[in-house]
Image (tube, rainbow, N blue to C red):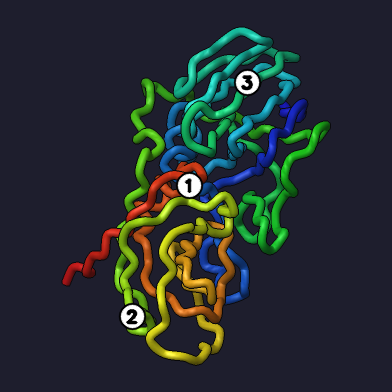
Amino acid sequence: MAELVVVRPGPLTTVQDLGRRGVAHLGVPRAGALDEPALVAANRLLGNAPGAAALETTLGGVAVRVTAPVVVAVTGAPAPVRVDGRPVPWGAAVRVGAGAVLEVGTATHGVRSYLAVAGGVAVPPVLGSRSADLLSGLGPAPLAAGDRLPVGAPGTPAAAGPVALPGPPAELLLRLLPGPHDDWFEDAPPRGGYTVAAASNRIALRTEGPPLHRARPGELPSEAMVLGAVQVPPDGLPVVFLADHPTTGGYPVVGVVPRADLAAAAQARPGTPLRFLPVRPAR
């Protein structure tokens, strides 16, 4: 069985698939790739199942040595890709020989790149997923130098060509469905004037900009939280919950961002302008 041996883990590299489904009632977050279309595209290039586990990098990339010949693909945030120092294509299937070092460099745009390997990263699943969850600590820990990751058996080689994915946003536009507590604020729903905050992570995208002002005092009992929920903590700045979000929370929810918009949120760098686009659910 081939292995990926971590040479350089980068600032934050984790194993991710499509996450844990159906266990929120146990207090277990969803986790999984923040940019799901990028993960699915990388797996399609390799003939993997759409949700096969891959490596999600953060800004600074990753370097691994392969112990046997493998085929890999890198998608998500554009970044230079090299094998033993030689440039190879991003967004395409690439063969890597035994003993070679595959390096995904610093992202030129966006935040998160996905390094997939034919057969998938075959770490043991926990509650039906191989994903690392930074909030609960489930799944494999963020990668460290020297870690060895097993690779599964490859399936039928894919015939797919280059992938077409939207580029990282110059301005992040997030649709906003009404939330259960939108009447708790004088100036809800939030609209423009925000930027992506540097404190954003896999748990939530945090914002900087005009705070929302409460129209009613008081606190809420903890309630169930969903992916994309936009909570408003006491500082008034909206927080968009991402894949590692808690399953309950006690701050008012002013709206919910549809899942389809969250891949762009995963690729928005700190300082990116952000606008919420209030919409009404289709009837």
Q: Which of marks 1 and 3 is nearer the N terminus?
A: 3
Counting from the top left corner in percent of width and height, residue 177 is at 30, 68
**Pointer 1: what residue?**
266
272 up-or-down from 175: above or below: above
Residue drawn at 76 percent across, 30 percent down: 6
Which residue type carries mark 2?
Glu
Q: Mark 1 Cα within 10 Å, few/some/many (few <14, many 20+)? A: many
**Pointer 2: what residue?**
186
Q: Which of marks 2 and 1 is nearer the N terminus?
A: 2
Tell which tag, 1 or 3, sits nearer the viewer.
1
Tell which tag, 3 or 2, sits nearer the viewer.
2
- Alpha-carbon distance for marks 1 and 3? 28 Å
**Pointer 3: what residue?**
70
Tell me the quarter of the picture where residue 213 sits.
bottom left
Residue drawn at 55 percent across, 19 percent down: 80
Which residue type carries mark 3?
Val
